[in-house]
């Protein structure tokens, strides 16, 4: 099958166009897979979620979704995947708690690319194990979108983790492969996925692992997760969600001295980063209103135990990258 988007294909900008696309894809999926079973790695990101929703509509429980919780997801994410897909969409969902496995493998590893490789390789291993437990899988669904095929931008250049072994090479089902991100979102919305799933900011494959710099510890990972949840909540409340390209917190691997309740404390800082970009090659810093920043700082200091300082990163890309690692 060609990997070039047909010139006649209209851009999907409305619900009506999305509905037509969905009908067309349901027919195409049914024609391709027949009675076969399809496996999907469902991260809860926009692309895999939309593929899941589409396939559930087309083939129901013949789709087996595997959600791997590697311990590096944001607060509430694994729970939301279970709620939306298993509870609400009645999906055949396998939830794999691989938190200890990933964190044990990552213990003591400080080098960023090494961390990425471990996370990627372990992910494939866990997914492979789940694939082997399933009987009669013939197809593998993937959330490939058109920019992945065009290989534009640095985002997917990081996806250097290899794939499943040869005896698990299934025929691919890639219903979104000619869509751009904005079209995927319209389709996802039309399929009834929640807004915070469809309009979410980009999130790297290695997740919070690259925001807990150096060797990951459970303690600092929790500080990243809790502070990130506060930042996201405040951005959403103050109309910045969907306006700012990417915003998150980072917890570096050093402590500093501070004062709490009249006593000296030696604790971790949290760094806030909020950037805008068109293609992720360069990025500028969002001018978050100072009043809001102060409010977020107050909340993090009050609510996240073990943090005594909050910093705001004003570095554009270049010279910084968007992430810290
Ligand atoms: P950087 O930090 O390189 O990030 O300026 C550019 C964009 O890519 C995302 N990113 C990743 N995405 N796996 C991914 O899937 C990764 O290892 C990875 N590293 C960075 C980053 O969040 C930003 O959107």
Image: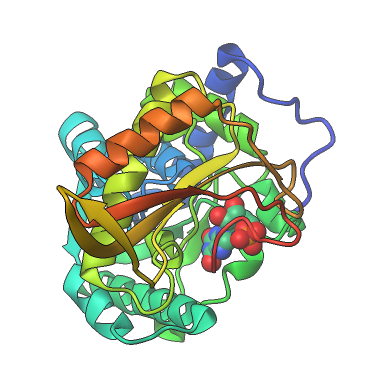
Q: Position of residue 61 (x, y in %)?
A: 24, 44
Name the one closer to the observer, 28 or 13: 13
Q: How many marks?
A: 0
- Tell whether 223 sits left or right of 112: left
On the rendered image, what quadrant is the C terminus found in? bottom right
State whether residue 67 is above or below residue 10. below
Residue at x 32% of width, y 35% of height: 298
Name the one closer to the observer, 298 or 183: 298
Residue at x 66% of width, y 67% of height: 157
Colouring of the image: rainbow
Residue 162 seen:
no
Residue at x 41% of width, y 82% of height: 118
State whether residue 304 is above or below residue 87. below
- Tell whether 176 sits left or right of 73: right
- Tell whether 13 sits left or right of 187: right
State whether residue 241 is above or below residue 229. above
Q: Position of residue 54 (x, y in %)?
A: 42, 36
Q: Quadrant of residue 60 in the image?
A: top left
Ligand 1 shown in quarter? bottom right
Q: Position of residue 106 (x, y in %)?
A: 32, 81
Q: Quadrant of residue 213 in the image?
A: bottom left
Q: Position of residue 259 (x, y in %)?
A: 25, 54
Q: Residue furthest front?
A: 262
On the rendered image, what quadrant is the N terminus found in? bottom right
Residue at x 28% of width, y 74% of height: 126
- Tell whether 149 sits left or right of 39: right
């Amino acid at each position: 099958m060609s990997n070039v988007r047909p010139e006649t294909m209209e851009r999907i900008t409305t619900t009506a166009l999305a509905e037509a696309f969905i009908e067309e894809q349901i027919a195409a999926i049914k024609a391709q897979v027949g009675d076969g079973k399809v496996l999907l790695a469902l991260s809860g990101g926009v692309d895999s979620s939309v593929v899941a929703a589409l396939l559930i509509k087309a083939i129901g429980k013949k789709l087996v979704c595997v959600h791997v919780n590697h311990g590096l997801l944001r607060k509430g994410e694994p729970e939301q995947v279970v709620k939306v897909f298993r509870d609400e969409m009645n999906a055949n969902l396998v939830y794999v708690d691989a938190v200890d496995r990933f964190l044990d493998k990552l213990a003591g590893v400080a080098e960023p690319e090494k961390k990425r490789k471990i996370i990627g390789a372990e992910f494939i291993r866990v997914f492979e194990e789940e694939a082997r437990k399933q009987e009669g899988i013939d197809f593998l669904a993937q959330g490939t979108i058109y920019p992945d095929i065009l290989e534009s931008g640095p985002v997917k250049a990081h996806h250097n983790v290899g794939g499943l072994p040869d005896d698990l090479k299934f025929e691919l089902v890639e219903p979104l492969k000619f869509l751009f991100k904005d079209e995927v979102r319209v389709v996802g919305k039309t399929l009834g996925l929640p807004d915070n799933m469809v309009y979410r900011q980009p999130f790297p494959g290695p997740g919070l692992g690259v925001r807990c710099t150096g060797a990951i510890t459970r303690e600092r990972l929790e500080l990243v997760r809790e502070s990130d949840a506060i930042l996201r909540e405040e951005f959403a409340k103050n109309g910045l969600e969907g306006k700012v390209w990417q915003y998150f917190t980072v917890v570096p691997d050093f402590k500093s001295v501070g004062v709490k309740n009249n006593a000296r404390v030696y604790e971790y800082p949290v760094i806030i980063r909020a950037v805008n970009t068109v293609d992720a090659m360069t990025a500028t810093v969002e001018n978050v209103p100072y009043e809001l920043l102060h409010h977020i700082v107050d909340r993090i200091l009050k609510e996240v135990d073990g943090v005594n300082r909050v910093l705001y990163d004003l570095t554009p890309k270049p010279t910084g990258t968007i992430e810290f690692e």
